[in-house]
């Protein structure tokens, strides 16, 4: 697996990479993850890291010009690790992973699988890295087109991605395989946590006893709707609603804490900072009576919603196709960007806990039926098998010279 990120960190696409890897390992696959030099090592995972970039000790989450150098280092590391491990399949995550993996897959004559998690140019626009009418847009759009056309199979994390790949990038429908994000149903099982466990978390974060909690777990950024969430908290406080917001994630915690202070809701909002996905995320999230996903981006997935569903929580979300794909008619939807609507949807659930409980139970069942990583790994395995069969399943041991002859 080619992971052009600082794997592992406790958010977003990292969770998908981790979940896919562990589910495939359970089916007997041996996986090597090649990634940037930063990130957390996890037990049971074979992670190979690039060298440290000499002039850049740190880097931003998301789009950055420094990623070009990181990806050059990553390509060199993939080449080195590939010669050592002789992979049967190259599985590239995100567009950079598809580009790096694609060039080497052709050199080694190996199948390439692209794990598509959203539009490259769409994400760069969301992060403010390029403008739709800017000089660099067409260049990056061309790079995105190349990344989409290199692989023999594309795993798409949402159903809306299939028409995008077909219509905008000319990817043949036969190459596209739906593989929505899933939930770790055992990890995010509400039955794991007692009332005493939740009370201890409340005490840890200074949440008053008896006050309902609105929970958020994910990245903190404008395109994730963090400012909208804080403004909704201010409106609810002004309306006299007793509710607390538990905002879990990073980066930019100081920036948004300052915003909370300016809005006068620092007594109603707790920022936890980075939350360990394996140790603490399910317990902390279970404290929420309502979960929220105010994500504005129309191009990325929203895996956090699946964790909410697994925990049996009612979900208030901005109305996007990805949210509707996951939540169907069980979500509480708000027009995208509508702060007043967000506050009102939360208020309505606060005053109708029975409806919230019923929605949460149905969402848990929906997650069990449709969003299991075990079933997802079997789909990935079937894609691998079909690609290897198309190649004749020839033996893959040997050296590079033999491959080229």
Image (cartoon, rainbow, N blue to C red):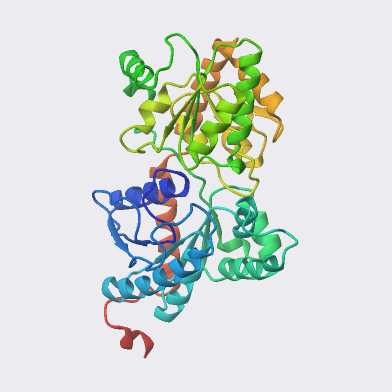
Numbered disc total: 0
Image location of residue 309, percent across then percent down: 49, 30
Q: Quadrant of residue 230?
A: top right
Q: Quadrant of residue 375?
A: top left
Q: Is residue 179 visible?
A: yes
Image location of residue 76, percent across then percent down: 38, 74
Q: Specify the farthest residue to the left.
A: 43
The residue under the point 49% across, 64% down is 66
Horizontally, residue 93 falls left or right of residue 29, namely: right
The residue under the point 61% across, 66% down is 144
Which quadrant is home to the N terminus?
Answer: bottom left
Residue closer to the observer: 18 or 55: 55
Which quadrant is home to the C terminus?
Answer: bottom left
Image location of residue 379, percent across then percent down: 44, 52
Residue closer to the observer: 108 or 231: 231
Image location of residue 122, percent across then percent down: 64, 55
The residue under the point 62% across, 58% down is 129
Q: Quadrant of residue 110?
A: bottom left
Residue closer to the observer: 369 or 50: 50
The residue under the point 52% across, 46% down is 180
Q: Specify the farthest residue to the bottom.
A: 405
Q: Is residue 331 visible?
A: no
């Amino acid at each position: 697996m080619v992971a052009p990120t600082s794997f592992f960190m406790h958010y977003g696409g990292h969770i998908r990479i981790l979940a896919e890897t562990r589910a495939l390992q359970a089916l007997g696959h041996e996986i090597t993850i090649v990634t940037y030099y930063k990130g957390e090592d996890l037990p049971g995972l074979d992670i190979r890291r690039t060298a440290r970039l000499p002039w850049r000790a740190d880097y931003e989450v998301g789009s950055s010009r420094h990623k070009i150098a990181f990806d050059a280092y990553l390509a060199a590391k993939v080449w080195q690790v590939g010669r050592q491990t002789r992979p049967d399949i190259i599985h590239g995550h995100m567009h950079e992973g598809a580009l790096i993996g694609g060039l080497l897959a052709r050199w080694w004559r190996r199948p390439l699988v692209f794990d598509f998690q959203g539009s490259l140019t769409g994400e760069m626009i969301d992060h403010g890295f390029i403008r739709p009418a800017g000089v660099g847009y067409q260049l990056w759009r061309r790079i995105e087109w190349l990344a989409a056309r290199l692989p023999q199979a594309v795993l798409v994390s949402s159903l809306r991605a299939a028409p995008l790949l077909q219509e905008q990038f000319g990817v043949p429908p036969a190459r596209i395989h739906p593989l929505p994000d899933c939930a770790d149903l055992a990890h995010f099982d509400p039955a794991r946590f007692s009332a005493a466990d939740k009370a201890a978390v409340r005490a840890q974060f200074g949440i008053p006893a008896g006050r309902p909690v609105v929970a958020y777990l994910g990245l903190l950024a404008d395109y994730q709707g963090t400012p909208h969430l804080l403004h909704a908290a201010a409106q609810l406080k002004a309306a006299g609603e007793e509710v607390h917001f538990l905002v879990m994630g990073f980066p930019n915690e100081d920036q948004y804490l300052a915003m909370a202070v300016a809005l006068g809701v620092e007594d109603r909002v707790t920022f936890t900072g980075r939350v360990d996905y394996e140790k603490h995320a399910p317990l902390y999230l279970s404290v929420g009576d309502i979960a929220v996903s105010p994500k504005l981006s129309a191009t990325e997935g929203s895996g956090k919603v699946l964790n909410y569903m697994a925990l049996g929580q009612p979900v208030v979300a901005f109305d996007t196709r990805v949210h509707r794909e996951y939540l169907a008619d069980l979500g509480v939807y708000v027009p995208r960007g509508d702060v007043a609507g967000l506050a009102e949807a939360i208020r309505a659930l606060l005053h109708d806990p029975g409806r919230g409980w019923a929605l949460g139970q149905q969402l848990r069942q929906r997650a069990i039926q449709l969003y299991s990583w075990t079933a997802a790994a079997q789909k990935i395995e079937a894609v691998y098998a079909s690609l290897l069969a198309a190649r004749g399943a020839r033996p893959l041991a040997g050296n590079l010279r033999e491959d080229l002859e």
